[in-house]
Image: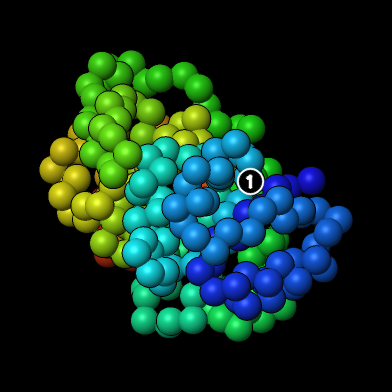
Amino acid sequence: MLKAVILDDEIRGSKLLSHKLEEFAGVLSVEAVFNDPVLALASIEAIKPDVLFLDVEMPGMNGFQFLEHLGTFKFEVIFTTAFGHYTLEALRLSAVDYLLKPVDQQELQKAIDRLRKRLSGKPNVREEKPGKFSSHRLSLITAEGVYLVEKSTITRVEAMSNYSVFILADSRKIVVSKTLKEYEAVLDDEHFIRISRSVIVNLHYVVKYKKGDGGTLEFTDGAEVEVSPLRKDELMKRLF
């Protein structure tokens, strides 16, 4: 049974989503509903959810800032918002999905399916550290503190609005309030390559390339990321 948490400053919105999730009672259980991000920060670690349904626009602390304040987390995220001006493509990279309010039941079904598919791939995450640059570390500054991360454990870095999400081999995610461009030079290494405007990947964690206009990369954690057609040729040279 998957454990879910809802964080939405609007009581009506959180109740409505909780009600709609009852349709998936056989696979998902809503463990907690929060209307205050500060209270959620204090409690979510103890709950250990598999997924967080997270409102984007909240007074005092928006959804991105909430994730940054957590510092590091392992659960998946499904964004919910009444505002459609966010870049859906970018948000869907790090998040399982992005749902517009009022949440459509069919779209919710698709999001749950995507969630289950992504979680099913997690046990396959490789644990070994590629050799020759494993001692190189990167300092990631978040609202919660500074994380020193081995570059060799970074599977990919994905843009999320004006933030960057570092996804590690042990499934942890670290949200940093800097754009992807600021890390491009730092990750200028033979193992890393930018495959689109929104993603830098570590080729050590790629398990499959699927053909297409630009193609799609599948990772050891089950995630799939599209490749920009403009960067396909460079990727092919590096892969093969």
Q: Position of residue 146 (x, y in %)?
A: 26, 32
Residue linked to disc 1: 50
Q: Secondary structure at mark 1?
A: loop
Q: Who's the residue at 50% across and 60% down the image?
A: 36
Instruction: Tell which of 37 and 221 is nearer to you.
Output: 37
Does residue 163 appear left or right of residue 81 in this picture?
left
138 relative position to 59: left or right: left
Rendered residue at 63%/45% (across/down): 49
- Indicate the quadrant where residue 204 lies: top left
Task: List x then y, in percent, for residue 117.
Answer: 67, 52
Q: Quadrant of residue 52?
A: bottom right
Total marks in image: 1
> Is residue 10 something that shows in the picture?
yes
Picture colour scheme: rainbow
Residue lying farthest right?
Answer: 26
Above or below, 213 against 76 in this view is below
Q: 18 or 77, which is in the foreground?
A: 18
Q: Position of residue 197 (x, y in %)?
A: 27, 62
Q: Nearer the viewer, residue 172 or 116?
A: 172
Image spot of residue 10 (x, y percent)? 54, 74
Q: Residue at x 60, y 83 (%)?
A: 102
How many other residues sit within 10 Å of disc 1, few (<14), some (14-19) or many (≥20)?
some
Is residue 203 visible in the rendered image? The answer is no
Three-letter amino acid code at the position of disc 1? Asp
At 43% across and 81% down in the image, what residue appears? 83
Q: Quadrant of the C terminus?
A: top left
